[in-house]
Image (cartoon, rainbow, N blue to C red):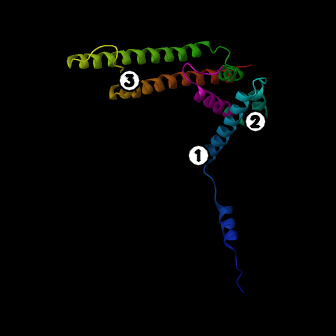
Amino acid sequence: MAEVKSTIEIALEKAKTMEISPDDRRRFKHEEMMSRARHIFQDHMNNVHRSDILRQALKESREDAPLLRRCFTEVLSGALEPGRSSARIWEGFCELGLSDTGPFEKALNRIAENEARSRRETAHLIKDRVRRSLAETGISGTAVDIHVEASDQWKTSLSERDKKRRVELDAICTKIAEATERCSSSPQ
Protein backbone atom coordinates (compact mmCIF):
# COMPACT_ATOMS: atom_id res chain seq x y z
CA MET A 1 0.00 0.00 0.00
CA ALA A 2 1.30 3.43 -0.93
CA GLU A 3 1.90 6.03 1.72
CA VAL A 4 -0.28 9.13 1.39
CA LYS A 5 1.56 12.39 2.14
CA SER A 6 0.06 15.73 2.86
CA THR A 7 1.03 18.76 0.83
CA ILE A 8 2.93 20.15 3.80
CA GLU A 9 4.98 16.95 4.13
CA ILE A 10 5.89 17.07 0.44
CA ALA A 11 6.85 20.75 0.71
CA LEU A 12 9.01 20.07 3.78
CA GLU A 13 10.82 17.22 2.02
CA LYS A 14 11.57 19.46 -0.96
CA ALA A 15 12.68 22.30 1.32
CA LYS A 16 15.29 20.03 2.91
CA THR A 17 17.14 19.79 -0.38
CA MET A 18 17.00 23.51 -1.17
CA GLU A 19 19.97 25.76 -0.47
CA ILE A 20 20.28 29.49 -0.17
CA SER A 21 22.88 31.09 -2.41
CA PRO A 22 25.68 33.09 -0.72
CA ASP A 23 24.35 36.30 -2.32
CA ASP A 24 20.87 35.64 -0.95
CA ARG A 25 22.33 34.81 2.45
CA ARG A 26 24.23 38.16 2.46
CA ARG A 27 21.10 40.02 1.32
CA PHE A 28 18.98 38.38 4.04
CA LYS A 29 21.62 39.21 6.65
CA HIS A 30 21.78 42.82 5.45
CA GLU A 31 17.97 43.13 5.59
CA GLU A 32 17.98 41.64 9.10
CA MET A 33 20.68 44.08 10.24
CA MET A 34 18.88 47.05 8.60
CA SER A 35 15.73 46.11 10.49
CA ARG A 36 17.72 45.88 13.71
CA ALA A 37 19.47 49.19 12.97
CA ARG A 38 16.10 50.91 12.44
CA HIS A 39 14.88 49.51 15.76
CA ILE A 40 18.05 50.69 17.52
CA PHE A 41 17.64 54.09 15.84
CA GLN A 42 14.12 54.43 17.24
CA ASP A 43 15.35 53.45 20.71
CA HIS A 44 18.22 55.92 20.37
CA MET A 45 15.91 58.77 19.29
CA ASN A 46 13.30 58.04 21.99
CA ASN A 47 15.64 57.46 24.94
CA VAL A 48 17.47 60.76 25.26
CA HIS A 49 18.79 59.84 28.69
CA ARG A 50 20.67 56.79 27.42
CA SER A 51 23.75 57.24 25.29
CA ASP A 52 24.89 53.62 25.23
CA ILE A 53 22.13 51.98 23.18
CA LEU A 54 24.24 51.49 20.07
CA ARG A 55 27.39 50.49 21.95
CA GLN A 56 25.40 47.86 23.83
CA ALA A 57 23.88 46.51 20.60
CA LEU A 58 27.29 46.36 18.92
CA LYS A 59 28.72 44.53 21.91
CA GLU A 60 25.89 41.99 21.79
CA SER A 61 26.25 41.52 18.03
CA ARG A 62 29.91 40.46 18.10
CA GLU A 63 30.48 38.93 14.63
CA ASP A 64 27.70 41.01 13.05
CA ALA A 65 28.93 44.26 14.62
CA PRO A 66 30.65 45.64 11.47
CA LEU A 67 27.52 45.09 9.37
CA LEU A 68 25.27 46.50 12.10
CA ARG A 69 27.57 49.54 12.34
CA ARG A 70 27.29 50.15 8.57
CA CYS A 71 23.51 49.69 8.69
CA PHE A 72 23.15 52.07 11.63
CA THR A 73 25.27 54.63 9.77
CA GLU A 74 22.95 54.23 6.79
CA VAL A 75 19.85 54.71 8.95
CA LEU A 76 21.31 57.76 10.70
CA SER A 77 22.37 59.25 7.37
CA GLY A 78 18.89 58.69 5.99
CA ALA A 79 17.46 60.76 8.84
CA LEU A 80 19.67 63.76 8.09
CA GLU A 81 17.76 66.74 6.79
CA PRO A 82 19.45 70.04 5.89
CA GLY A 83 18.52 72.66 8.45
CA ARG A 84 16.42 70.24 10.54
CA SER A 85 18.67 67.45 11.81
CA SER A 86 18.27 66.48 15.43
CA ALA A 87 21.18 66.66 17.84
CA ARG A 88 20.33 63.04 18.69
CA ILE A 89 21.29 62.00 15.16
CA TRP A 90 24.72 63.59 15.59
CA GLU A 91 25.03 61.90 19.00
CA GLY A 92 24.40 58.60 17.20
CA PHE A 93 27.34 59.27 14.90
CA CYS A 94 29.43 60.08 17.98
CA GLU A 95 28.42 56.69 19.44
CA LEU A 96 29.86 55.17 16.26
CA GLY A 97 33.15 56.85 17.13
CA LEU A 98 32.87 59.90 14.87
CA SER A 99 34.28 62.46 17.28
CA ASP A 100 34.01 65.56 15.10
CA THR A 101 30.64 65.95 13.42
CA GLY A 102 31.10 69.71 13.04
CA PRO A 103 32.20 69.73 9.38
CA PHE A 104 29.25 67.53 8.42
CA GLU A 105 26.80 69.69 10.36
CA LYS A 106 28.20 72.80 8.67
CA ALA A 107 27.90 71.18 5.25
CA LEU A 108 24.23 70.35 5.94
CA ASN A 109 23.59 73.89 7.13
CA ARG A 110 25.24 75.21 3.97
CA ILE A 111 22.86 73.11 1.86
CA ALA A 112 19.90 74.54 3.81
CA GLU A 113 21.18 78.12 3.43
CA ASN A 114 21.80 77.67 -0.30
CA GLU A 115 18.35 76.18 -0.73
CA ALA A 116 16.70 79.08 1.14
CA ARG A 117 18.65 81.62 -0.93
CA SER A 118 17.71 79.83 -4.15
CA ARG A 119 14.04 79.80 -3.13
CA ARG A 120 14.10 83.54 -2.39
CA GLU A 121 15.88 84.36 -5.66
CA THR A 122 13.56 82.20 -7.73
CA ALA A 123 10.48 83.68 -6.06
CA HIS A 124 11.80 87.20 -6.70
CA LEU A 125 12.47 86.43 -10.39
CA ILE A 126 9.02 84.93 -10.90
CA LYS A 127 7.29 87.85 -9.17
CA ASP A 128 9.25 90.37 -11.26
CA ARG A 129 8.38 88.54 -14.48
CA VAL A 130 4.68 88.36 -13.58
CA ARG A 131 4.59 92.04 -12.52
CA ARG A 132 6.21 93.09 -15.82
CA SER A 133 3.65 91.02 -17.74
CA LEU A 134 0.83 92.57 -15.76
CA ALA A 135 2.27 96.09 -16.22
CA GLU A 136 2.29 95.56 -19.99
CA THR A 137 -1.48 94.97 -19.82
CA GLY A 138 -1.97 98.06 -17.64
CA ILE A 139 -2.26 96.27 -14.30
CA SER A 140 0.12 97.42 -11.59
CA GLY A 141 0.31 98.21 -7.91
CA THR A 142 0.73 96.40 -4.64
CA ALA A 143 -2.82 95.07 -4.55
CA VAL A 144 -1.78 92.21 -6.82
CA ASP A 145 -0.65 89.26 -4.73
CA ILE A 146 1.46 86.82 -6.71
CA HIS A 147 1.53 83.19 -5.59
CA VAL A 148 4.78 81.90 -7.05
CA GLU A 149 4.12 78.37 -5.77
CA ALA A 150 1.37 78.00 -8.37
CA SER A 151 3.65 78.71 -11.35
CA ASP A 152 5.16 76.02 -13.53
CA GLN A 153 8.53 77.76 -13.30
CA TRP A 154 8.43 77.41 -9.50
CA LYS A 155 7.55 73.72 -9.72
CA THR A 156 10.38 73.12 -12.21
CA SER A 157 12.80 75.07 -10.04
CA LEU A 158 11.69 73.11 -6.97
CA SER A 159 12.28 69.82 -8.77
CA GLU A 160 15.76 70.93 -9.86
CA ARG A 161 16.61 72.14 -6.33
CA ASP A 162 15.44 68.82 -4.87
CA LYS A 163 17.70 66.88 -7.26
CA LYS A 164 20.68 69.09 -6.44
CA ARG A 165 19.96 68.83 -2.71
CA ARG A 166 19.75 65.03 -2.92
CA VAL A 167 23.13 64.85 -4.72
CA GLU A 168 24.75 67.13 -2.12
CA LEU A 169 23.17 65.21 0.76
CA ASP A 170 24.27 61.87 -0.71
CA ALA A 171 27.83 63.18 -0.98
CA ILE A 172 27.80 64.20 2.69
CA CYS A 173 26.32 60.83 3.72
CA THR A 174 29.07 59.05 1.75
CA LYS A 175 31.73 61.09 3.56
CA ILE A 176 30.10 60.33 6.91
CA ALA A 177 30.01 56.60 6.09
CA GLU A 178 33.70 56.70 5.14
CA ALA A 179 34.58 58.57 8.33
CA THR A 180 32.64 56.17 10.57
CA GLU A 181 34.23 53.23 8.74
CA ARG A 182 37.68 54.67 9.48
CA CYS A 183 36.65 55.06 13.14
CA SER A 184 35.61 51.43 13.33
CA SER A 185 38.88 50.21 11.83
CA SER A 186 41.10 52.36 14.04
CA PRO A 187 41.94 51.16 17.57
CA GLN A 188 39.62 52.67 20.19
Residue ID for mark 2? 61
Q: Secondary structure at mark 2?
A: helix
Point out the tag, 2 or 3, that comes first from the N-terminus. Answer: 2
Measure the alpha-carbon separation of dots 1 and 3: 52 Å
Q: Residue 79's x, y, as percent?
A: 60, 28
Circle 3: is it few (<14), some (14-19), or many (20+) Cα within 10 Å? few
Residue 93's image quarter?
A: top right
Residue ID for mark 3? 147
Residue 14's image quarter?
A: bottom right
Task: Judge by depth and name the residue closer to the eye, 141 or 14.
Answer: 141
Q: Secondary structure at mark 3?
A: loop
- The answer, for residue 65, to whether it is visible in the render is no
Task: Judge by depth and name the residue closer to the eye, 174 or 130.
Answer: 130
Report the quarter where the C terminus lies: top right
Look at the numbered discs 1 and 3 and tell me whether their residues touch, using CB distance below 8 Å.
no
Point out the tag, 1 or 2, that comes first from the N-terminus. Answer: 1
